[in-house]
Image: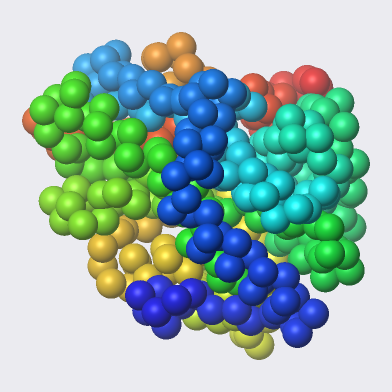
């Protein structure tokens, strides 16, 4: 891999005002990523603060009910703050502290990344501001309250579709306005180099743990690893240490919304094409004129019109498969897993669970690991309303 590139994907497509900050960040990351003291400090935070390693749980009832494959859940929902987001946030915030920054900013969709960033900022004694699309602040009001409770200032973004892509754009603009003391804690494996690589590395603790936990539980690697994909950080984290294990299928599940044959979808691989947006070359949902298209998903965390550049490379090279999952299918999985295993998954993770429900009956004597990227507490009111029950947090 050429630095900052995954095949033709990746790069640094940003205004000159951000190049200095990116170069500073890249040099700092190269300095610290193999530094034993930095990594020991981060591992200590993972273990003592975030609660790692997260469990690998055998979903016995689901496995028996579906027939076919043995299904394991990687329980990232059991991390402090309730999702995989804390892994990357602790890494980036620790790095920002080493760089002498005193303020962190972040974008958020479902709110889990914003909550994790506000949490780490409180822990490290840093200022924190979070940008969130107005639509997402309304459907994830509880997480907005949590961020403010933790001391963060939350900005509702009204531009564009007032969702995740607009929050990213506003956060990048804010970073450009104040780079001297501020670090942008980008939440996914997207954006300009070094973010896709750096976020992947911090999230790769997921696949490192899965590998050792599977060998301990079954004496072998799984046949498939399945994860939901918006920008793609939880999936990249779950895939990374299996990329060279060609016998392990890697399956990313995108948000199809109301269907890939409609305009109300966020399934980038199924409906998008190569373009440049948010500082990177990758796959994006675009209109007939090459403009970034509005996207839709019941899931605020998957409501993004692109995928990270390493995912684009894995797709194009054939190493990973990407499948669309509709709102209806994700909600059905959300309810099914809650009733069957007593675990309420995030609606994002429910997209991956839906696909597992689809394929498990046809994989007798095989093993599937699905990454439960977050808790579903934040989604209960929205799913109830989706089902016609008018409740509020």
The residue closer to the viewer here, 30 or 130, is 30
User: Which residue is outermost to the bottom?
Assistant: 289
Question: Picture quarter containing residue 220?
Answer: top left
Q: Residue at x 31, y 58 (%)?
A: 321
**Residue 176 in sight here:** yes
**Residue 144 in sight here:** no
Pinpoint residue 75: horizontal percent, then vertical percent. 43, 26
Q: How many marks?
A: 0
Q: Is residue 111 left or right of residue 276?
A: right
Q: Residue at x 66, y 87 (%)?
A: 289
Pinpoint residue 356: horizontal percent, then vertical percent. 32, 37
The residue closer to the viewer here, 42 or 320, is 42
Q: Residue at x 39, y 14 (%)?
A: 340
Reply above or below: 118 against 18.
above
Q: Is residue 130 left or right of residue 25?
A: right
Reply above or below: 310 against 56.
below
Q: Is residue 358 left or right of residue 106?
A: left
Point out the image quarter for the N terminus.
Answer: bottom left
Pinpoint residue 117: horizontal percent, then vertical percent. 71, 40
Point out the image quarter for the C terminus.
Answer: top right
Q: Is residue 185 left or right of residue 162?
A: left
The residue closer to the viewer here, 361 or 305, is 305
Q: Residue at x 58, y 54 (%)?
A: 188
């Amino acid at each position: 891999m050429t630095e900052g590139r995954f095949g033709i994907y990746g790069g640094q497509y940003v205004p000159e005002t951000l190049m200095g900050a990116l170069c500073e960040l890249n040099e700092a990351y190269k300095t610290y990523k193999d530094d034993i003291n930095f990594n020991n400090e981060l591992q200590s935070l993972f273990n003592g603060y975030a609660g790692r390693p997260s469990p690998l749980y055998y979903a016995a009832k689901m496995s028996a009910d579906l027939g076919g494959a043995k299904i394991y859940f990687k329980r990232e929902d059991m991390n402090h703050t309730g999702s995989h987001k804390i892994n990357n946030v602790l890494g980036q915030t620790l790095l920002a502290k080493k760089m002498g920054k005193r303020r962190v900013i972040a974008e958020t969709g479902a709110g889990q990344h914003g909550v994790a960033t506000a949490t780490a900022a409180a822990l490290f004694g840093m200022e924190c501001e979070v940008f969130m699309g107005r639509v997402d602040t309304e459907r994830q009001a509880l997480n907005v309250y949590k961020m403010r409770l933790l001391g963060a200032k939350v900005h509702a973004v009204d531009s564009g579709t007032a969702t995740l892509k607009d929050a990213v754009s506003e956060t990048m603009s804010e970073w450009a306005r104040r780079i001297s003391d501020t670090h942008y804690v980008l939440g996914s494996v997207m954006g300009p180099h070094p973010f896709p690589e750096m976020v992947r590395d911090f999230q790769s603790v997921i696949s490192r743990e899965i590998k050792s936990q599977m060998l301990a539980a079954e004496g072998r690697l799984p046949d498939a690893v399945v994860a939901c994909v918006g920008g793609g950080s939880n999936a990249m984290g779950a895939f990374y240490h299996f990329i060279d294990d060609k016998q392990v299928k890697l399956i990313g599940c995108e948000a199809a919304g109301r269907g890939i044959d409609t305009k109300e979808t966020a399934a980038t691989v199924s409906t998008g094409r190569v373009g440049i947006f948010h500082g990177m070359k990758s796959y994006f949902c675009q209109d007939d004129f090459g403009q970034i298209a509005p996207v839709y998903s019941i899931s605020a965390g998957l409501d993004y019109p692109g995928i990270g550049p390493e995912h684009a490379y894995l797709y194009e090279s054939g190493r990973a498969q990407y499948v669309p999952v509709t709102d209806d299918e994700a909600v059905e999985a959300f309810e099914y897993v809650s009733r069957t295993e007593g675990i309420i998954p995030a609606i994002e993770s429910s997209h991956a669970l839906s696909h597992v429900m689809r394929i498990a009956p046809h994989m007798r004597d095989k093993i599937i690991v699905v990454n439960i990227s977050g808790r579903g507490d934040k989604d209960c009111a929205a799913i109830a309303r989706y089902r016609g029950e008018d409740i509020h947090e």
